[in-house]
Image (cartoon, rainbow, N blue to C red):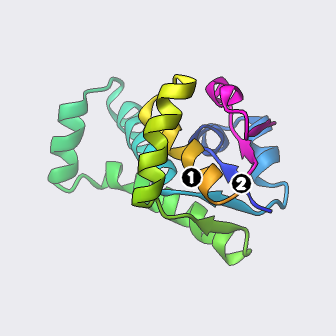
Amino acid sequence: MAVFLDSSVIMGYFMGREDARRVVESGLEFAINDVVYSEVAFGLLRARYHEVRGTYSFYDMKRRLAEGDESLSSAYVIIEDFLRVLEGESRLRFLPVTRRVVEAASAVAKAFGLLPNDALIAATCRHYGIGTIATFDEDFRRVPWLRVVP
């Protein structure tokens, strides 16, 4: 059974956290959805922007991306390479967020006080029968069908 790999662990991996590295390199099979891809891509863009500019401006980042700033768009290469490696090792499944998952996410958000992306992740896990999530986000501990690791 796959472990859902939350964006917090992937970002931790890229930021050099030892506990995140151990999770990613554990040999486990992982699952993600488009929410995780989006959160990680945005997090890498923001980190790259801050690294290059020394500050952060959402609108300036958007403008620079639209202008083709390769120092920022390299964030997409990083996430794609990461995903490609896990896929090449047959350790990654992409789970689609369906209309049914979206409907369930609304109920999950209300029942457990989750933000929309976390509710979509929890609903995705429930829909696909995933009972374990690798995350550093303590909010998932309120979801009774998920076991949080590490």
Q: Quadrant of the N terminus?
A: bottom right
Residue displayed at 67% across by 77% down = 88
Quarter of image, res 26 = bottom right
Examine the rendering and report whether any part of residue 51 can be seen: yes
Q: Is residue 11 left or right of residue 115?
A: right
Residue displayed at 65% across by 31% down = 140
Element carrying mark 2: loop
Give the x, y percent position of residue 98: 43, 61
Disc 2 designates what residue?
130
Give the crowd class for mark 1: few <14, some 14-19, many >=20 residues within 10 Å. Answer: many
Q: Answer with mark 1 or mark 2, whichever residue precedes in sequence.
A: 1
Q: Is residue 16 magenta?
A: no
Give the x, y percent position of residue 103: 42, 48
Q: Nearer the viewer, residue 34 or 115?
A: 115
Examine the rendering and report whether any part of residue 38 can be seen: no
Q: Is residue 148 left or right of residue 48?
A: right
Q: Is residue 107 left or right of residue 53?
A: right
Disc 1 designates what residue?
124
